Image (cartoon, rainbow, N blue to C red):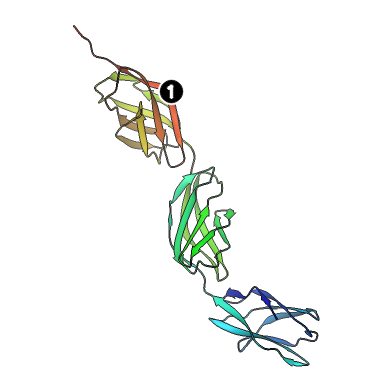
Amino acid sequence: MPISPNQGSSGGGTLVTITGTNLSGTSAVRFGTRSATSVTNVSPTQVTAVSPSGSGAVGVTVTTPGGTSNPIPFYYVGAPFKQSLSPTSGSTAGGGTVTINGTGLSSATSVAFGANSAVPTVVSDSQITVVVPAGAAGAVGVTVTTAGGTNNGLSYTYVAAPTVTTVAPNEGPTSGGTAVTVTGTSLTSTSSITFGGTPAPFTVISATSVSAVTPPGAAGAVDVVVTNDAASATAAGAFTYVAGPGI
């Protein structure tokens, strides 16, 4: 006599379907010593019931005018507990893989990032991974759903790809050391700025402005590349290295 699902929240409320024979006239379904609620005799071979609250493994029995069945196991599962997720931000396009650590995650069926959900991969009871769905820029709550219930409390930040509008001043000596201001959009999570492929020290001023100091470089125009948690933006030939005079 199978039962599906065979596990549910310790708080009760799981709708289970019991399949067997001679189930007509079912008068009671018990989970251990506790009676189920909303028992429905669907057919002579099927009964549905809503589990009461409980803990651990219990035997489920069905009582009809003919007697009481042998018990079949049902497992109560506690609500999941999330400790951390990594990384905590990524592109609005989604597609990155996030690792969530905690407890009670072995029966995870869904992870919601705000209003958008994805199906996780269970690594162990203490870890799951999930591919982040697309979302709008900004921070959203992360909710994990398991057979034991749901848990939230962690957040994930969607980051739009950066853009570069201007680099000012747009030229300086090959020795480097020129203080420049890069303006654009989605610059808050800037992780690197390069001039001709060489990293430059920088400071984020705002979502639309970053200051940087040019590294040394060969004479000529070079690309300025800004990278944030989502992607990179290239301003082709945006800065020109000027060789010093010779006499």
Q: Nearer the viewer, residue 70 or 91?
A: 70
Of residues 19 and 31, the one nearer the viewer is 19
**Mark 1 Cα within 10 Å, few/some/many (few <14, many 20+)?**
few
x and y percentages locating residue 80 in the rendered image: 50, 68
The percent coordinates of residue 9 (x first, y second) are 57, 74
- For residue 246, side relative to residue 51 (left or right): left
Q: Secondary structure at mark 1?
A: strand
Instruction: Name the outermost residue toward the left.
Output: 247
Give the residue at x 58% y 57%: 119
Residue depicted at x 33% and y 32%: 211
Quarter holding the N terminus? bottom right
Q: Which residue is mark 1?
A: 236
Residue kind at label 1, given as amino acid type: Ala
The answer to whether residue 82 is visible is no
In this rendering, the answer to whether 89 lies above or below 101 is above
Q: Residue furthest top?
A: 247
Quadrant position of residue 190: top left
Give left or right: position of 244 versus 122. left
Residue appearing at x 27%, y 20% in the figure: 174
Q: Where residue 204 appears, x then y in whole percent?
A: 35, 37
Q: Is residue 217 visible?
A: yes
Q: Up-down: is 220 above or below 82?
A: above
**x, y percent for residue 16:** 68, 75
Residue visible at 57% across and 60% down? 110
